Amino acid sequence: MPIKINLIAPPRYVMTTTTLERTEGLSVLNQAMSVIKERIEEKRGVFNVQMEPKVVTDTDETELARQLERLEKENAEVDGDDDADEMEAKAED
């Protein structure tokens, strides 16, 4: 069963899967989260779950897509951000 992992804004990610078997889908997501947690903690990182996996309907999925889009827009780079950083870097040289 394929799992999608989408970057929202570092270090926040969202994991999703689509299946007709609710129990199996939740189990697969939980197993994947376990493996990711182990790998992060092996490197002395911190793994926090903001929201436990849950089953969503098509309506919930549409709302989630809207929220993800809003978060991506909020975290999008604002025009001119790079210019200021580049000017500071040049001034330091």
Image (spheres, rainbow, N blue to C red):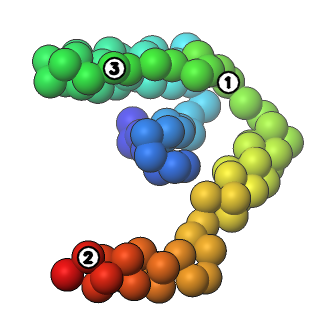
Examine the rendered structure and indicate whether residue 56 appears above or below residue 72: above
Relative image position of residue 14 (x, y in whole percent): 53, 39
Label 2 near label 1: C-beta < 8 Å? no
Residue 80, by quadrant, is bottom right
Q: Earlier in the sequence, mark 1 or mark 2?
A: 1
| Disc on the earlier residue, 3 or 2 | 3
Q: Which residue is mark 2?
A: 92
| Mark 3 crowd level (few <14, some 14–19, many ≥20, 10 Å Cα) | few
Q: Residue furthest left?
A: 42
Q: Badge 2: how crowded within 10 Å, few (<14), some, or many (20+)? A: few
The reply, left or right, for residue 28 in relation to residue 19 is: left
Instruction: Identify the residue under disc 1.
Output: 55
Label 1 secondary element: loop
What residue do we see at 20% from left, 81% from top? 93
Above or below residue 64? Residue 32 is above
Disc nearer the start of the sequence (1/3): 3
Q: Position of residue 56 (x, y in %)?
A: 73, 30
Front residue (pair 90, 16) = 90
Residue 82 coordinates in the image, percent (x, y): 46, 79
The quadrant holding residue 21 is top right
Q: Which mark is nearer the camera, 3 or 2?
A: 2
The residue indicated by pointer 3 is: 46
Q: Amino acid at mark 1?
A: Val
- Name the residue located 31 percent from the left edge and 82 percent from the top edge: 91
Three-letter code for the amino acid on which mark 2 is drawn: Glu
Q: Which amino acid is tagged 3?
A: Val
